[in-house]
Image (cartoon, rainbow, N blue to C red):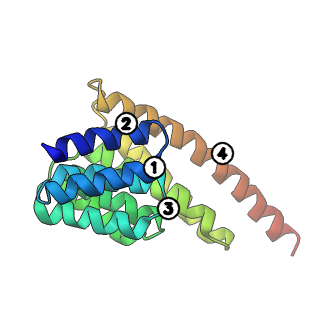
């Protein structure tokens, strides 16, 4: 009962933007219910999206998966932690596991594409930037082709696919033009 009350309090604190107290309540909830995989996953999501405590989020996500190897949300959560810190390979490995556990091909390719879209910002070489964005573009095209658009999550995924296709095309256009100008000036 303590875990449920602490979890509800954590959600209230998080909704109010009081992340310090939200974390304290999640920790209390986990102390009371240490084998609740979903609780660990929700806590990791808070850490990932409302703090920069990525190591802590990774630890909590791994614990969620350890508690329930079929917790697809926790597997995706761990992938997102890896993507956030720029570890595309480990993120992709987790997303591939999530697909094996039931996440759609479209969703998985969307997540991989978004990771590459954001990873491009950390690259310094223009050819590396373009390569990442071209990879993202291909994954987005595949995601769109395989999206069933049955409403709900499929509709949201399709909306995100279209959004990132537009963003990726625009960045690619700019970078390709820049590369051409650089080549012509040599």
Q: From the image, state whether disc 3 or disc 1 is nearer to you.
A: 1
Tell me if 180 is positioned left or right of 111 in this view. right
Give the number of the disc on residue 19: 1
- x then y, percent, for residue 139: 41, 52
Which badge, 4 or 2, comes first in the chain's sequence? 2
Residue 145, visible in the rendered structure:
yes
Determine which residue is flagged by label 2. 12
Position of 164 relative to 62 (above/below): above
User: Image quadrant of residue 88?
Assistant: bottom left
* Residue at position x 35%, y 51% in the image: 45
Q: Which residue is mark 4?
A: 170
Sequence-first disc among 3 and 1: 1
Name the residue that disc number 3 marks: 52
Specify the quadrant of the image occupied by residue 12. top left
Residue 85 appears left or right of 2 = right
Contact between marks 3 and 2 (CB within 8 A): the answer is no
- In the shown orientation, is residue 70 left or right of residue 14? left
Q: Secondary structure at mark 3?
A: loop
In the image, what residue occupies the spot 88% across and 70% down? 185
Count neighbours of disc 1 (C-alpha within 10 A) and say few if under 14, some if 14 to 19, many if 20 or more: some
For this rendering, which residue is in front, 14 or 155? 14
**Front tag of 3 and 2:** 2
Mark 2 Cα shell of 10 Å, populated few (<14), some (14-19), many (≥20): some
């Amino acid at each position: 009962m303590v875990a449920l009350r602490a979890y509800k309090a954590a959600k209230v604190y998080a909704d109010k933007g009081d992340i310090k107290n939200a974390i304290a309540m999640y920790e209390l909830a986990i102390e009371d219910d240490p084998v609740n995989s979903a609780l660990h996953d929700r806590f990791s999501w808070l850490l990932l999206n409302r703090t920069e405590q990525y190591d802590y989020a990774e630890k909590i996500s791994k614990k969620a998966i350890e508690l329930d190897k079929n917790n697809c949300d926790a597997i995706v959560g761990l992938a997102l932690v890896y993507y956030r810190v720029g570890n595309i390979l480990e993120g992709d490995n987790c997303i591939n596991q999530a697909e094996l556990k039931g996440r759609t091909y479209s969703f998985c390719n969307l997540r991989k594409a978004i990771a590459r879209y954001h990873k491009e910002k950390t690259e310094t070489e223009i050819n590396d930037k373009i390569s990442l964005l071209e990879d993202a573009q291909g994954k987005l095209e595949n995601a769109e082709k395989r999206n069933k658009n049955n409403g709900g999550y499929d509709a949201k995924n399709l909306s995100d696919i279209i959004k990132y296709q537009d963003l990726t095309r625009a960045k690619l256009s700019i970078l390709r033009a820049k590369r051409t100008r650089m080549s012509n000036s040599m």
